[in-house]
Image (cartoon, coloured by chain):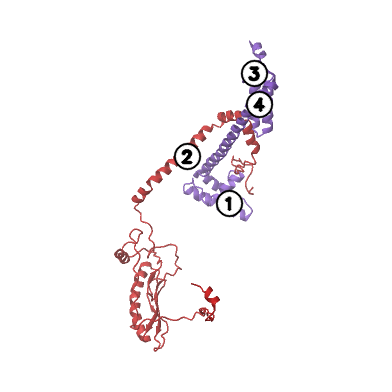
Amino acid sequence: MVPGYDSRQARTTLAGLTKPDPKERAAQIVAWAICWPWNLVWTLCVYNPFRYVGEFLLRELQSALFEISNGQFRAIEQDLTLEPLPPPYPACEADSRYGNSAVPQTSVEASNVAAKQAGEVDSSVSQAAAAEEAKAEAFADCSAVIESATVGVVAVADQSAPAAQPDEVDVAAKGVANKEVAAEAADETTIEDVPSEDGIPSEIEAMFEEAGSSDSYTWEPPEVTAFVPLSDRPLRAIKYDTGTTLPKKPVEPNRPVSDPWFEKHAPNQ
Amino acid sequence: MLSEILTSESFWFWVLVIVQSGLIVWFVESANPVAAGVTVGTLIVAIAFFPTQWETVGLDDLHEMSFPAWLSQNAWALLAGLGCYLFVGIAWATFRWWLLVRQIRESYERAKAEWLAPGNLRSTATMLRSHAEHCPEPTLREKYLLWSEACRMAAAEGGHQLTHELKPVWKDYVTNGSRL
């Protein structure tokens, strides 16, 4: 009993309602079973079970009929449904899951690039950065939460050339609004959930219209972005020292030249 | 006329049946299976004192033979009848249990619909606020104020929906039965 309530006030029939337990009411059930003719007459006269039975049968019948209708019309309803399914990859759409503290990133990463000189890297990176800056600005306009775009390029020099240090070019889109786009040069460009507060600008919508709507019916997998090397030098693989070594190939024991037992039990024979 | 009725065996037989039946119904409703079973037994035994009514209940063979002989002759029929009686009784008890649960559920739904009416929610909110004003315990006062606000908001939204905020109030109402 919660203190503070006046227990003298009228109580309802629901007071102390609990789920009926057959064990607790075993005596009642046995009495029903023993004296069923009398209880049958009394129940028919007093409780009017036909109403409950009728409602129950009606509900069950309705449920069964609805199931039949749903089963037969499932395909038809799918044909007539006009609402598109959500796009598999939401691109630049307003998403309330991210607050203002979320930092959406447009990352472009380039790695394993052989560069002539650090200066050449800078010049080629500048071109790529300019392109990425344009994209970043477009998405910054789109979402008003993007503050700046950063292009990070990791360039690895030739053996003869001095190794270029990773350079990070800041292609500022500052003045857009309190957010940041970290764009790293790479073989693919990913746009991850750029939230929009004021909706999508018209130019971005036009860009999306050119690319086609991204619903599930018209969606096609994106084309694989071609890798554009930032220098004329051939690409080189970078060998990373992971600290682990491959297990050595087991050394076969010296085969005796004339050992009948070994030849007898040699495999593949 | 009246004396003929009062002296007739049929009259008292049916009086006995009606009275015993009333007793059986009473005992069944009060969940007393022992008393109900004893009453059924006494009713069966009492039939022996009304030989003119044996034909009425299908025992006219008892006029021609003794009770043990009749019992041995109809033993299998009696056993089968008893089995059928108990089988039907179990089926009836199952149905009666379903009916009982159904009635409880219906009364619950009705009470819930009445409680979730906007007018009742408003009065509940007022009463809870009054409780909160007169409650010396701070935590309890805060709870009543919270519940009052929940009831007020639910009433403003049209009621008839047990929201997440209303559930503790409703649970307390169901548990304690107090008219909030």
Write down the residue under mark 3: B61
- Tell me which corner region of the image, top left, top right, bottom left or bottom right, holds residue B68: top right
Which of the two discs, 4 and 3, labels the residue nearer the N terminus?
3
Q: Answer yes or no: do the residues labelled 2 and 1 have beta carbons within 8 Å?
A: no
Nearer the viewer's eye, disc 2 or disc 4?
4
Residue in the image at 36% along x and 51% along y: A78
Chain holding disc 3: B
Chain holding disc 1: B
Who is closer to the viewer here, B114 or B138?
Answer: B114
Which residue is situated farthest in the top direction here? B1
The amino acid sitting under disc 1 is Tyr
Tell me residue A105's x, y (percent): 41, 71
Dot 4: element: helix
Dot 1: element: helix
Residue in the image at 51% along x and 35% along y: A53
Dot 2: element: helix
Who is closer to the viewer here, B79 or A175?
Answer: B79
Nearer the viewer's eye, disc 1 or disc 4?
4
Write down the residue under mark 1: B144
